[in-house]
Image: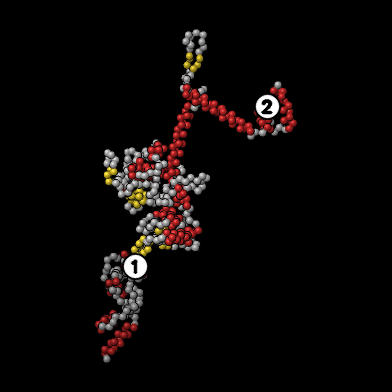
Amino acid sequence: MNATKRKFNTLLQGIGPRAPLAPDPKDGLTFPDDEGVASSPLSRLSASISNTTPVKATTSTLSTYSTFHTPSPSAELLGKRRRIGNIEMASPQQKTATATVSNIVMKKWTPSATATTVSSKKRDTSTAPPKYCPSDRDELIRRLGTFQELTEWTPKPDRVNEIEWAKRGWICQGKERVRCTLCHKELVVKTNTRTVEGKEAPVVVGSDVEHGLAKRFSELIIEAHEEDCLWRRHGCDDSLLRLPLAVPKAALASLRDRYDDLCTRSSFLPYAFNLRLPSTLDLKTVRSQLPPTFFTDPPPPKTNPSSPSDVALALALTGWQGLTNPRIGAVPNSATCATCLRRLGLWMFKSKEVDEVTGEIIVPAPMDHLDPLREHRLFCPWRNATAQQNPGAKTKDNKAAWEVLAQTLKNSAYLRQEGEKSTQRSLFHRPAASLPGTPFRNRGQGGDGQADVMMTPDKPEDEEEDMAARDAKDKERWAKLRRVKSLFETKGKKILQRTVSRPGTATSRPPTAHSRKESLADKPGEKG
C-alpha cells in the first residue's frame, strides 16, 4: 500500500512543473562563474564567447538557466526507468547549441564587399570565351586546338576533317566525340573504327561506304545543331585562316620571332642537307632581300648563333616555330605551326652521326628528309594556296603563304633600293647656277690685254651629261603635257584667258558679245 502511494505521488510530480534538467557536459555548454549574469540570449552568447575556459556549473546557475524552457521528465523517473531496465524513451528535450569562437563568424555588410563580388563576376564573364564568334580567327584556332590529340581524334576524310567541325562551332569532347559550344549538342564521329571488347579497332571499309559516311557526317556538321542554334545558320568563312603577309613591317617582325624561337633549338635542328625545299625558294636570294639590320635589330638573344642559320631561316619562311606546351613550357626538340597546329619532331629528321670533314652521313636519321611544306596539314595556308587566296582581290593569284611572304620580301627590297637611289640622286641633281663653289680669277698666259674672268670649279663630265639628258627629257615631257592640255581647252576659253592676261583689261564681269567683237577687231592692228 505504501509503495503504491509513493508511485502515485511520483506520477503526480511528473505531471506538474518540472525543474530543468542539467545539460550534459558532453554537449560542450559552458557557463560563466557569475550569478548575476543577464538572462537575455545576447548577453548569454557574449558571455559564453568571452569565457574561453570551461567552468563548473553551480546549482544556482543551473536552476536559473533554461535553454528552450521545454518540459522534460524528472531525474528520478528517468533514473528509475534505467534501473528497472526499461527501454529509454526519446526525450522531447532538444540538445542545446554550443556557442564557441570556432563556429561563430561575425560578418559585417559593406557596399565595397558587394561591389567586389559584382566586379569578380563581371571579370569571370569577360574572360570566358565567346560561344558564337564566326569572324574571330583566334577562337577558330582555339577550337581547332581541341582536335590535335591523336588519342581523342583520329584523322578523317577532307569533307569531315577537324577544320570543318571547328568552322561550325564544334570542339572535341572526348574519344571521337564533338560538342557544340552554343547549343551543347554532342555527336560521335566514327568513319573507319568500331568498338571491340571496349577498345577502338580500325576497320577496313570500302570506298563506297567511306564516301557515304563522309557525306552523312558532312550534313550532320550543320544539321546536328539545335534548330535555334546560330552555328546552324552561319559558320566561319573559308578565308578566315588567311595570313596577313602583305604588310612588310608586320611580316618581317613575325619572321624574326619565328627565327629566334627556332634558334633556341639549334642543337636539334636538322642539317641543311636534310631539308627538301621548293626549287623556287633560294635562301641566298632571300637573305640578300632582307633588311641589313634584320638579324641585329632588335638585339638577338644569347641562344642565337654568331652567324645566321640557314636551316632556322628556311623553317621560319615556311611557317614553323618552336613548340611551347602550356603545362611543361618549351619543348626543345619539337616545332609547330601556329595556324594548323601541326607538331613536328625535329629529332626524327636530323642525321645522328655525320663526318665533319667530308660531310658524309655515317648514321642516317629515322626519316629520309624533311619537307617543311608537306608536313603542314592540307588546309593550312602555308601549304594550301586556296586558303591563302584573298577573296577581295581583282586578280586571283594561286600562291601559298610562303610564296606571298617571299614576294613581300622581294618588293620590300626593291622599294628600299629605289629609295636609296633617289636619295643619292637628289644630292647631285642641282642646277648649274646653284652649284657651290669659290670664284677665282683666271688670267691669261701673257697677262696683257685680257680681261679677268670669274670661274667656278668644273663639274664632272658624267654629271654634266646626265643633267643635260635629264633637262632634255624634262623639256620634251613638258611639251607633251602642253599639247595634251590644249586639246581640252575650247576656243572661247583661250580668248578669255588672253584678254584677262593683258594688263589693264581685266574686268569683274565676263565679256559680252559686243566687247568680244571689239577685241577681235583691235587684234589685227596690234599685230601690224
Residue under the image location 29 percent in, 74 percent down: 23
From the viewer's perspective, is residue 379 above or below residue 296?
below
The amino acid at mark 1 is Leu
State left or right for residue 82 relative to residue 111: left
Q: Nearer the viewer, residue 134 or 60?
A: 134
Question: Which kind of residue does numbered mark 2 sit on?
Answer: Gly
Residue drawn at the location 34% of the way across and 82% of the way down: 16
| Quarter of the rendering occupied by the C terminus | top right
Q: Secondary structure at mark 1?
A: helix
Q: Nearer the viewer, residue 474 or 204?
A: 204
Which residue is disc 2 drawn over?
Answer: 504
For mark 2, give the secondary structure.
loop
Quarter of the image that includes the N terminus? bottom left
On the question of residue 409 being in view, the answer is yes
- Residue 522 percent location from the top left of the image: 72, 25
- Residue in view at x 42 percent, y 50 percent: 380
Q: Where is residue 248, by image quadrant?
A: top left
Residue 140: x, y in percent?
44, 53
